[in-house]
Image (tube, helix red, strand yellow):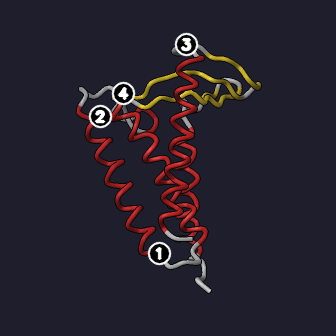
Amino acid sequence: MTYRVWVALAVALAVVDQATKLWAESRLDLHQSVELLPFLSLTLGYNPGAAFSFLGDAAGWQRWFLAGVAAAISIYVIFWLRRLARGHLWLSSGLALVLAGALGNLVDRLRLGYVVDFIHLHYGGFHWPIFNVADIAITLGAGVVIVLFLFGSESTH
């Protein structure tokens, strides 16, 4: 597949991310949990910071800083995808997932000034920070890229 296909898939997943966030905002009240399973709830939250609310209590400059980081990563990943030889299915998939997540959260930062989160994993007294589809894409994509770099890249044959 060409890099254009990977970018198109990333944009499509970013659209899915945005659709789920719009749904969450239309159906959930802020900070009110709706339990789906004993370990999974939907809880609407707004994160003006980065992962785990890092910089969340900054004075507002973090919006533009984090948007700039997401934009720079997106541009870098697009150029990386463009340079990849065909046959790098796993690396291209991982990069497309990272791109999708970066774009999904970038749209939130530019449009709202914060990221919309709503997926809440918990068990007993343990609560994982609330996240979204873009965060899942970034985590999976980064994991694929890291595994490939640590344990060897795929062949282009």
Q: Earlier in the sequence, mark 1 or mark 3?
A: 3
- How far is the residue under mark 4 from the one under mark 1? 34 Å
Amino acid on which disc 4 is placed: Leu
Across and down, in percent, residue 64 comes to 26, 38
- How far is the residue under mark 1 from the one under mark 3? 44 Å
Residue at x-position 44% and y-position 24% = 46
Q: Please tell me how crowded label 3 is: few (under 14), some (14-19), or many (20+) other residues with Cα within 10 Å.
A: some
Amino acid on which disc 2 is placed: Arg
Q: Residue 84 carries which label?
A: 1
Across and down, in percent, residue 4 comes to 48, 64
Q: State the residue position of label 3.
A: 29
- How far is the residue under mark 2 from the one under mark 4? 9 Å
Across and down, in percent, residue 106 comes to 38, 41
Q: What kind of element bears circle 2? A: helix
- How far is the residue under mark 2 from the one under mark 1? 32 Å
Q: State the residue position of label 4.
A: 112
State left or right for residue 38 relative to residue 26.
right
Q: Earlier in the sequence, mark 2 or mark 4?
A: 2
Q: Please tell me how crowded label 2 is: few (under 14), some (14-19), or many (20+) other residues with Cα within 10 Å.
A: many
Across and down, in percent, residue 150 comes to 55, 70
Pointers 3 and 4 in contact (CB under 8 A)?
Answer: no
* Residue 87 lies in quadrant: bottom right
Amino acid on which disc 1 is placed: Leu
Q: Which of marks 3 and 4 is nearer the N terminus?
A: 3
Pointers 2 and 4 in contact (CB under 8 A)?
Answer: no
